[in-house]
Image (cartoon, rainbow, N blue to C red):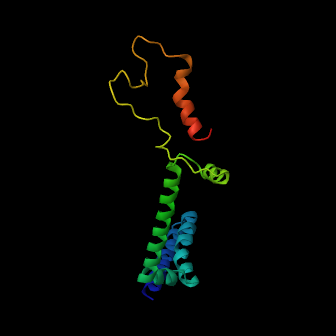
Amino acid sequence: MLAETIFSAASAAGLGIAAVTAYRKRFLAATRIAAYSLVPLGLVMTGVVEWVSDIAFKPSVWLGFGLLGLAWLLLVTTRATERRRSTTREERKAARAAGHTAVAPAASAPPLTSGTPADRPRSKPAKGQAAAPGDDFSDIEAILKKHGL
């Protein structure tokens, strides 16, 4: 009830300002002010103000918004987790249909070697060595194959 009164008073004040503006021969501005001042009155007459005030002051409505936010958060988290996996949903379905289980990304990594640094494989050629022509794009190709492109 209080919100409706405030909105109606704001609308009446806006129409008064529009009348003064029209009196000063600024008809375009007066029309614009009148249009803006009729919006609160229209909201009151359609019942939108009562509906919004009912929503704003009910704890059960806020609990509902909290549950919607929680549901959204859970959906986003599961999507992000699914995208971080190395295999896509279609690849996992195809693997299950073929009777194989999906391989975890860590299981497909090469085994770590222990020993001297000379025993470990190098990712970059040494200073004096030139890279093989195919090595320049091998990292990029591996990334593209990982994403199925």
Residue 57 showing in the rendered view: no
The quadrant the C terminus occupies is top right
- 77 or 48, nearer to the observer: 77
- The front one of 52 and 45 is 52
Residue 105 appears in the figure: yes
Q: How far from the left and from the top, in percent, is residue 25? A: 55, 65
- Residue farthest toward the bottom in the current orientation of the protein: 1
**Measuring 50% from the left and 65% from the top, which residue is drawn there?**
72
Q: Looking at the image, which residue sits at the far top?
A: 128
81 over 65 or under it: above or below: above
Q: Is residue 121 above or below residue 99?
A: above
x and y, in percent, of residue 67 in the image: 46, 73
Residue at point 54%, 30% (across, down): 140
Q: Residue 28 location, x and y as percent? A: 58, 63
Residue at 51% in and 29% down: 139
Q: Residue at x 48, y 64 (%)?
A: 74
Residue 4: give x, y in percent of width and height.
47, 85
57 and 118: which one is in front?
Answer: 118
Question: In this figure, what is the number of numbered marks?
Answer: 0
* Position above or below: 35 against 117: below
Quadrant location of the N terminus in the rendered image:
bottom left
